[in-house]
Image (cartoon, grey):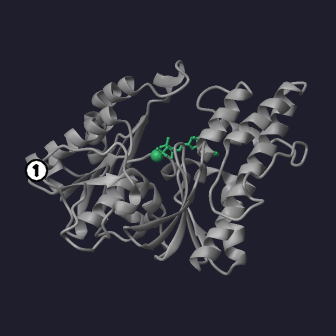
Amino acid sequence: MRVLGIETSCDETGVAVYDTALPGSAGLRAHAVYSQIALHAEYGGVVPELASRDHVRKLLPLIRQTLAEADLKLEDLDGVAYTAGPGLVGALLVGAGVARSLAWALEVPAVGVHHMEGHLLAPLMEDDPPAAPFVALLVSGGHTQLVAVDEIGSYRLLGETLDDAAGEAFDKTAKVMGLPYPGGPQLAALAETGRPGVYKFSRPMTDRPGLDFSFSGLKTQVMLAWRNSDQSDATRADIARGFEDAVVDTLAIKCHRALDAAGSNTLVVAGGVGANKRLRAKLHDIAGKRGGRASFPRPALCTDNGAMIAFAGALRLQAGQSETAAVKVTPRWDMATLPVVGGHQDQPLP
Ligand SMILES: Nc1ncnc2c1ncn2[C@@H]1O[C@H](COP(=O)(O)OP(=O)(O)OP(=O)(O)O)[C@@H](O)[C@H]1O
Ligand SMILES: [Mg+2]
């Protein structure tokens, strides 16, 4: 089954074709992402109306480009998957409208995908994928969640952030130290040259039981350290390293606890912060020491992309799930309400 995936939930237009007939990572026939970062940079954050309009401009050319790279024609598609939520309503409607119209014209089924389920399943697109049950750590710009995955489509929230998401903490901390928007990846690059232990920040909420997170206080700790420093490039790098170590340690401690709570040694990590090198190394290490393993998507598939939507949609379409022709999106959407893949057909997607 060849499925076109369309992602337009925020500030990236992502398109991909996933072919379920091909094994492992070969299934991803082509994918392309257009990032709107430059468009929003002067505002210091995503402007929803500008995001929607840019998706309108970029989506059709990107679909043509992706099909050409996959050496496929529109008529070769067997289904269309699109991000139906959570996200910015105007941005979601662009993807949903195009996806539904295409499916209608091609007389193929369409399915709305939960954006975070897309992230969560992205590591399963790689070769030698882990099988459920496992624990997933979702660490993106808007979410930090630990999820027990009993089977594909059955998600139990074990813990989540009470304030800032891990990616948001990276971005805000970068801004505090004068790095341009969005600073998360730049802060991580800077941390590579920083010295460990020169600045020591707290590991929030690790001194008590539980699987929730809180990252907003770290940003304040960095702000105070930065203000009271000589503000040199070397100091910026040392602070970046101290901050990154604090976030990575905190995530690792909670992952350990979540694996204990779920009785599992298999960890799946997804979302933009999953591209962080030190986090990848640390989580490989803790899962390995438990006799299990940690799985990540390749770094390009950690942040928003169409491939994860094509893949998650393909699993649901293969299981016989699809929707009526109504163009509907769900900007706020609890992943725990999703039907199990291959489960009961009387549980439609919202
Ligand atoms: N190497 C890295 N180290 C740390 N953070 C990173 C790295 N690369 C990307 N990020 C962070 O990942 C986030 C973007 O990830 P992603 O695209 O998955 O999030 P999002 O789509 O904005 O949020 P959500 O999926 O929750 O709606 C940003 O906050 C960015 O700072
Ligand atoms: Mg995302």
| Residue appearing at x 52%, y 73% in the figure | 134
Lateral position of residue 293 relative to residue 12, left or right: right
Lateral position of residue 257 relative to residue 341, left or right: right
> Which corner quadrant holds the N terminus?
bottom left
Q: Nearer the viewer, residue 258 or 140?
A: 258
Image coords of residue 32 (percent x, y)? 39, 44
Q: Is residue 55 above or below residue 196?
A: above
Q: Secondary structure at mark 1?
A: helix
Image coords of residue 127 (percent x, y)? 48, 69
Q: Residues within 10 Å of mark 1 (few under 14, many from 20)?
A: some
Q: Nearer the viewer, residue 106 or 89?
A: 89
Image coords of residue 102 (percent x, y)? 15, 45
Q: Nearer the viewer, residue 270 or 84?
A: 84
> Which corner quadrant holds the C terminus?
bottom left
**Residue 192 makes an appearance in the image:** no
At label 1, which amino acid type do we have?
Answer: Leu
Q: Which residue, given by chain and number where applicable, does mark 1 sit on?
A: 106
Image coords of residue 202 (percent x, y)? 80, 49
**Residue 273 makes an appearance in the image:** yes
Indicate yes or no: mark 1 CB to ligand 2 under 8 Å.
Answer: no
Lateral position of residue 40 relative to residue 206, left or right: left
Q: Give the residue at the far top of this rendering.
A: 42
Q: Nearer the viewer, residue 213 or 102?
A: 213
Q: Is residue 197 above or below residue 211?
A: above
Q: Is residue 318 above or below residue 214?
A: below
